[in-house]
Amino acid sequence: MQDAQVYKANALVEASYRLSLYEQRIILACIAQVRRDKPLTDQQLYTVSAQQIADMAKISVDRAYQHLKTASERLFDRRVTLHEAPNGNGHAKVRLTRWVQEVVYQETLGTVALRFSQPMVPYLSQLTEQFTRYALADVAKMTSAHAVRLYELLAQWRGSGKREVEIEWLREAFQLGEKYPAIKDFKRWVIQPAIDQINEHSPLWVNWEQKKTGRKITHLAFSFGEKIQESRHKPQKGKSKDTAGKAPKNGSGALYGIPMPVIEKMAQLGESYEDAALRLLDESKRGA
C-alpha cells in the first residue's frame, strides 16, 4: 500500500462529514484500491486488514485489530453531505448520503470489507478534471482526523500554493457542531495540531494566518509548498562561512521547503539563509 494513490472528486474533498481517525484510515485504504482502468460499481467489495492498518499507523497488530473492529461498526452509520456533482456538472444541490451500504467484519481473519454506497461511486470514479489525488503514504502517519481533512483541502490547491477559507465553512466541513465555539480554542485544538502534523509527516510545508472582516476573525489563509528532499533529513548544526547569507546553489529555489523569495524577505540582519529557513519552519509549526 506504500505507493497507493487516493483519488477523490473535489466535491467530496469539500463535503461536510465527520470520521474518526481510524474510520478515515479504513475509507482511504479502500479508496486507494479503486482501479482507475476499470469502472467502479457499488457491488465491489474492498477489504482492509488489521495488518495494513498496523503498518499504516505504526502500531501493533493487536491494537490495530481493536481499532478496526470499533471503527468498522461505526462506519455503517456515518453520513456525508455533498454540495456538488462529482465533476461540477448540473445545478448545485445538497445531497445527504452514506459512505457505505455494507460493512462485513471477518473477526477470525482480522479484516473488514465494505461496499461503497451507490451515490458515492461517481465521486470516486468517472473523474475528469475536478478531482484531488495524493499518495496514501502522505497521511499515513498522521494521528489527527482534522490533519487528514486539512491536508486534502490544501492538496486540492497544490498548484497555486495558497488557499483562503472561511472559518464557518471549515467548521461545517469538519462537522464540529458546538465544539470549540471560541476562535482561540478552534485554533488551539483543531488548526494548529493539524498544521503541525502536516509539516511533520506530509510532503508539504504549511504557513497560515488569520484574517478579519471588520473586528471579527472570519478567514484563515494558508500558504504551502512541496518540501525539498533536503528537508527530510535532520539538518546539521552550525553553518559554513562559505554559505552563510548565500542562496542555495541547487537550483531548487527553496530551502527546507520554503521558497527563497520568502526566506530573502524574512531573513534577519546577519542571519544566513539556512538559519532563516530553519527559524521560519519552526515558527510555522508554532503558528508564529
Image (cartoon, grey):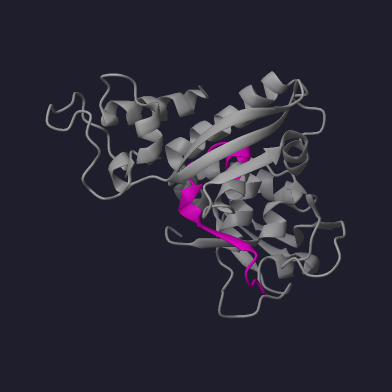
Seen in the picture, residue 129 relative to 261 is either above or below; the reply is below
Q: Give the total of numbered labels.
A: 0
**Which residue in the rendered view is the most extreme toward the left?**
242
What percent of the width, then of the height, locates residue 280? Answer: 40, 28
Q: Residue at x 52, y 50 (%)?
A: 53
User: Does residue 260 appear left or right of residue 287 in this picture?
Assistant: left
Q: Is residue 128 magenta?
A: yes
**Range of magenta residues:** 126-148
The x, y position of residue 217, in whole percent, is 72, 25
Does residue 59 show up? no
Q: Position of residue 124 (x, y in %)?
A: 66, 66
Left or right, 173 with respect to 60, comes to right
Residue 55 magenta: no
Task: Give residue 127's quadrant in the image.
Answer: bottom right
Outermost residue on the bottom side: it is 38
Q: Residue at x 52, y 52 (%)?
A: 158
108, above or below 166, in the image: below
Tell me what residue is drawn at x 83 percent, y 69 percent.
Answer: 90
As rendered, which of 88 and 15 lies closer to the eye?
A: 88
Q: Residue at x 30, y 47 (%)?
A: 229
> Is residue 19 at least partly visible in the picture?
yes
- Residue 250 lies, with reference to residue 37, above or below; the image says above
* Front one among 152 and 67: 152
Residue closer to the observer: 223 or 14:
223
Residue 85 % position (x, y):
78, 65
